[in-house]
Image (cartoon, rainbow, N blue to C red):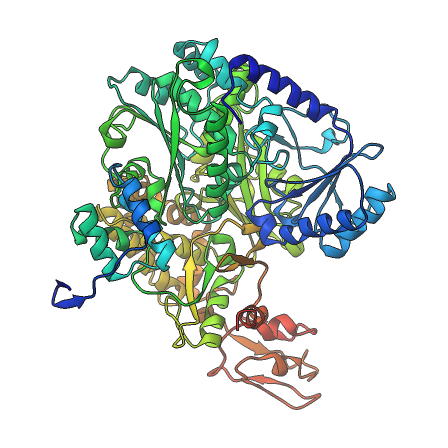
Amino acid sequence: MVAGKGIVTRKVALSDNLKAFIEKWQERPGNLIMILHRVQQEYRYVPREVAFEVARVLDIPLAKIYGIITFYHFFKLEKPGEINLHVCTGTACYMKGANELISKLENLLDVRAGGTTADGKFSIETVRCVGCCGLAPVLMAEDEVYGKLTTEKLQGVISHYT
Amino acid sequence: MAKITLDAFQKLRSEQAIGRRESKGIHVVVSMGTCGIAAGAKRILKTFLDEIHMLKLPNVAIKQTGCMGLCYAEPTVEIRMKDMPNTLYGRVDIPIAKKIVEEHLIGHRLVGNHVYDYPAKDILCEGEDYLNEAKLKQFRVVLRNCGVINPEDIKEYIARQGYVALKKVLFEMRPEEVLEELKISGLRGRGGAGFPIWLKWKLSADAEGDEKYVICNGDEGDPGAYMDRSALEGDPHSIIEAMAIAAKTVASNQGVIYVRAEYPLAIERLGIALSQAREMGLLGKDILESGFDFDIEIRLGAGAFVCGEETALLASTEGNRGMPTPKPPFPATHGLFDKPTVINNVETLANIPCIIEKGGAWFKSIGTEKSPGTKVFALTGRIENSGLVEVPMGTTLREIIYDIGGGIRDGKEFKAVQTGGPSGGVITKDFLDTPIDFDSLTAIGSMMGSGGMIVMDEGDCIVDVTKFYMEFCVDESCGKCSPCRIGTKRMHQILDQITKGNGIPDDVQKLQNIGHATKMASLCGLGQTSANPVLSTLRYFEKEYLEHINEGKCRAARCKNLVSYTIDAEKCVGCMLCAKQCPVPCITGERKKLHVIDQNRCIKCGICHDVCKFDAVIVA
């Protein structure tokens, strides 16, 4: 058991793949961001206990890891829903109604942007430009891109995953 | 694939080039950039595979390529075969794909309504007969291979003059000669600031140090620009080749490509390209037996716009929070891990092999005197044909928007075009005929930036769009220096109040003051340019700001607090359509009688206005 700030955190064993990745990068300068990418690829976020473990293995302060995670939008401290709905809020999408898409999604799923539904199925996130401006407004559900969306089409997108 | 010697490389190159020119059989080429895939290109590829397999057609090669820039017509498919002109099909769905197989491949007839003009000539296909050259405004240097070659096959790149420039630099040119060629070319950095490239390289070349780095800046963060993504996805080897050329010139052995994690396809294709280049001996130890070593690794960004700024990018590559540092010292002398470092943007690098191969004077002959070459723009917004366009510098906005882009959507009136994203400004109708280059855009209060070009029509509110950009800057300000951290926040608050109808007459002056202060006092490019959208819209659209503030009016009806919807008693026929469509619902009325909107419950979504066939809903 590792104690930090009065919160007790269970110690976890990292997967062999992850351990091998860290080992490969361990001696290379500036490795932390690449390692956190790998952690997030495996867990879909950076769990607290994993962050503890990474800090121990790399022999760096936990605060450094926390600093990185909170600086970069890509890294998450909370587990996202099974299906992460990324609404693009780039300029072209904004002009063509990204905000309307977000409010409609919030209504349909009963959760605010940035949050996850109670059943852990969906989360809504905003993302800065996925580079499909020709198809604006765009939503990315995991790896699938839905373009030229309207608020009416959203129910169809959600139904695809339920 | 084994490592190849110089002789073997020469032989492979001529074989590939001949093979490409004289290839028989049928080529079906599906455009598979991110936007093509988003529009369904994978399904189309599979349909072609299935159909051709089912019909047992001989000699058909189906392959993928990068983005051709025709985002509005995705998915696109090109057919090359004997006895038929090279043909580009757009908006292809599964039935159309089947029809193309039946009619074009087998029946030798074009499938009408889906044939598109080739968008551009490129430096390698001039004079080919399928191009209607007189009509073409686009000229491709940077995107010369995008939409032409399979980016996952190094041999196709080699067939199109690939790695010839690297060979030249390794065996035929001294570093000073490379610098001289770049100086003659007049190439300026395409990341936004337009700094002369030869000088950047020379500073690094002259710097003392046993270790030096070459970095490709692929952290394209401008929301609404995606030319770098397209180049990385469609032609990764041109970037690798250019980095190797830079490395040889400044005497570096290690390169880094810093690319956004949001571009998974670009990362994947870069990875494939790097390992192919290594296998062939075009990267790694003793390249082409020249004695020169160079290798490249990929580092991922993690979603921070400020990391496009070079000192912040260095901090991020070093594994830290991406915060900029004051310049000088410049990265050219004190860069990654404090070593001399060349940092160039993707689009800049893509030009380099062509300059080395064809000479600086050739490059200089394209574009304008002070900004030679071409520029890629991401043309989006209220435009008929949105997509990536590459034009010689000095092309006018009118040519880009009307001749290439097909004009404004739905026959609406042009209002302004925003260039340079959150660092740029608006350009109005009066400047549509200004030839654009780095300096002319700065002179009219905008900037080239990375090349985002967002077209606005009469339905867009200038204050609202400016607020959007400012919100972006507030989010993306790293917080290190107070002028940017506080300035952007305060400007956003004021803009927000104006769009909500709470503006006061003093606001315009306040925005000017804060904007100028932020511009003068911020540490890095992000802060220094963050006020540009505000200052430039105030310069050309002050009247619209004042209408919001003094009259509580938003002429584009985008600022919801300033809009009310009412029904014209003269025009309403009582068809009930608006009442049915109203999501709240707050419209009441009986059939064939006047309908009324309950102002207290109306959420101002505008649906009633859009659906009314009698123009009876008044927006005020």
B431 or B222, which is in the foreground?
B222
Drawn side of residue B319 relative to residue B156, left or right: left
Asked if one can make out residue B364 in the rendered structure from this viewpoint, the answer is no
In the image, A153 versus B162, the foreground residue is B162
Q: Residue furthest bottom?
A: B590
Q: Is residue B113 visible?
A: yes
Extreme residue toward the front, this view: A16
B131 vs B171: above or below:
below
Q: Position of residue B422 (x, y in %)?
A: 40, 47
Circle count: 0
Residue B244, by quadrant, is: top left
For the point 57% across and 49% down, which residue is it? B35
* Residue found at x 70% / y 73%: B613
Q: Is residue B250 above or below residue B264?
A: above
- Left or right, B180 with respect to B227, comes to left
Residue A75 sits above or below residue B353 on the image = below
Question: Residue B97, percent across and down?
Answer: 75, 51
Say which quarter of the image contains residue B617. Answer: bottom right
Tell which of B458 and B374 is nearer to you: B374
Q: Position of residue B435 (x, y in %)?
A: 55, 31
Q: Residue at x 85, y 43 (%)?
A: B106
Image position, residue B588 (x, y; %): 59, 88
In this view of the protein, which residue sits in the foreground, A112 or B530? A112
